[in-house]
Amino acid sequence: MEAQENSQTEQNVQTPKKRELALVSRSTYIKEKALQWIFFACAFLAVVTVILIFVFTTYSALPVFTDIGLADFFSFTWAPSEGHYGILSLLAGSGLVTVGALAMGVPLGVGTAVYLVEIASKRVRKLISPAVDALACHAAVDLLAGIPSIIYGFFGMIIIRPFIAQLTGGLGFGALTAWFVLAIMIVPTITTLTIDALNSIPMGIREASYAMGATKWQTIYKVVLPAAKLGIVDAIVLGMGRAIGETMAVLMVVGNAPVIPDSIASPISTLTSQIALDMSYSSGLHRSALFGMGVVLFIISATLVGIVRLISKKKRG
């Protein structure tokens, strides 16, 4: 008798579970599985595409190893018509414009984010709305980031270059002009990510600092910024990737002289600008050398992404 009652109780318990399972119909289950495979296919396609691009670029650059040689490839003389394919002067140009752009853009981007999150009042945000208020919500930053590179290049060539030429007495083409253009271009990226990092800091940390007698400025640079430093480093690294990979804007303002510059106001060339300049007419070893530059840029970009991943992993840990 007791066994029969227990069996009936188990059936009563299992019945709701069966009903819950019955709520998911077979067609719904099939649709969910189909969506799962579609999303997997999209992710797989993205990964495979990146791998294929790297394989194609590396395969096209093989003559760099077999015919040109790494010693010539990593030399300072870029003169394809004379059989010299050294990229160190171009690599130095890329490094020079990137470092200068970061030196200008990082303080501006981080300062903008700090002002919007920590200092600006609602009245001030409404006063300068929609630009800055939308910036805090990432909309204006997206608009700035969405401006085509060639527009930045035109701005640098028509507005900034004459000013630099008057200031230095030269033509105005060079690293100094590129610094201003790239600094403007990387500010949206740095600002957006820095805002995210600052907003992720709990308000209780700020309140604890105020309770200890710290002023607003002391709280910002001794408490909030150190707490958000990993996110800020992420922003800087991604801004660096944007600067080192920029092509059209840099092509229009650096002067495209593949030499080590005498000064920051002298014409230079970068890896990206030289690829864009030569690819349309190159052939043979010249074309392979350009693909070799692409491999170098790919490795640099992958390294920067890896740094961001490591920093993010350390932050989560």
Image (tube, rainbow, N blue to C red):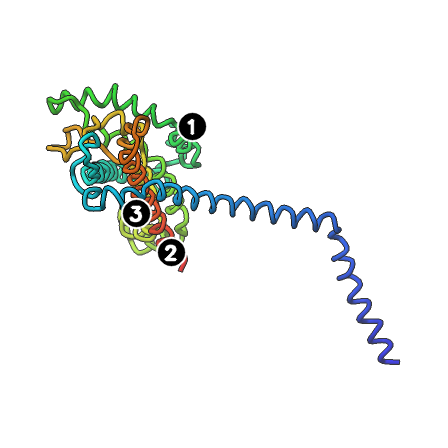
Q: What's the residue at 33%, 38% (across, down)? A: 242
CA separation in Å, label 1 and label 2: 33 Å
**Residue 52: assigned label:** none
Q: Which quarter of the figure has residue 138?
A: top left
Q: Is residue 286 visible?
A: yes
CA separation in Å, label 3 and label 2: 20 Å
Measuring from the top left, give residue 241's x and y in whole percent.
32, 41
Q: Earlier in the sequence, mark 3 or mark 2?
A: 3
Is residue 7 toward the left or the right of residue 114 in the image?
right
Question: Which residue bears the numbered disc 3?
Answer: 220
CA separation in Å, label 3 and label 1: 25 Å
Q: Nearer the viewer, mark 1 or mark 2?
A: 2
Instruction: From the viewer's side, name the closer residue of 286 and 253.
Output: 286
Q: Is residue 154 above or below residue 282?
A: above
Task: Label 2, secondary structure: give it.
Answer: helix
Seen as rendered, the residue at the extreme right is 1
Labels 3 and 1 touching (C-beta < 8 A): no
Instruction: From the viewer's side, name the closer residue of 9 and 302.
Output: 302
Name the amino acid, label 2. Answer: Lys
Task: Label 3, secondary structure: give it.
Answer: helix
Q: Which quarter of the figure has residue 282?
A: top left
**Residue 130: assigned label:** 1
Measuring from the top left, give residue 314's x and y in whole percent.
37, 58
Please rate how many residues cluster around mark 2, counting C-alpha atoms within 10 Å: few if below 14, some from 14 to 19, many from 20. few
Quadrant where the image shows the C terminus: bottom left
Instruction: From the viewer's side, name the closer residue of 114 and 61.
Output: 61
Question: Which residue bears the numbered disc 2?
Answer: 315
Please rate how many residues cluster around mark 1, counting C-alpha atoms within 10 Å: few if below 14, some from 14 to 19, many from 20. few
Q: Earlier in the sequence, mark 1 or mark 2?
A: 1
Quadrant where the image shows the N terminus: bottom right
Task: Label 1, secondary structure: give it.
Answer: loop
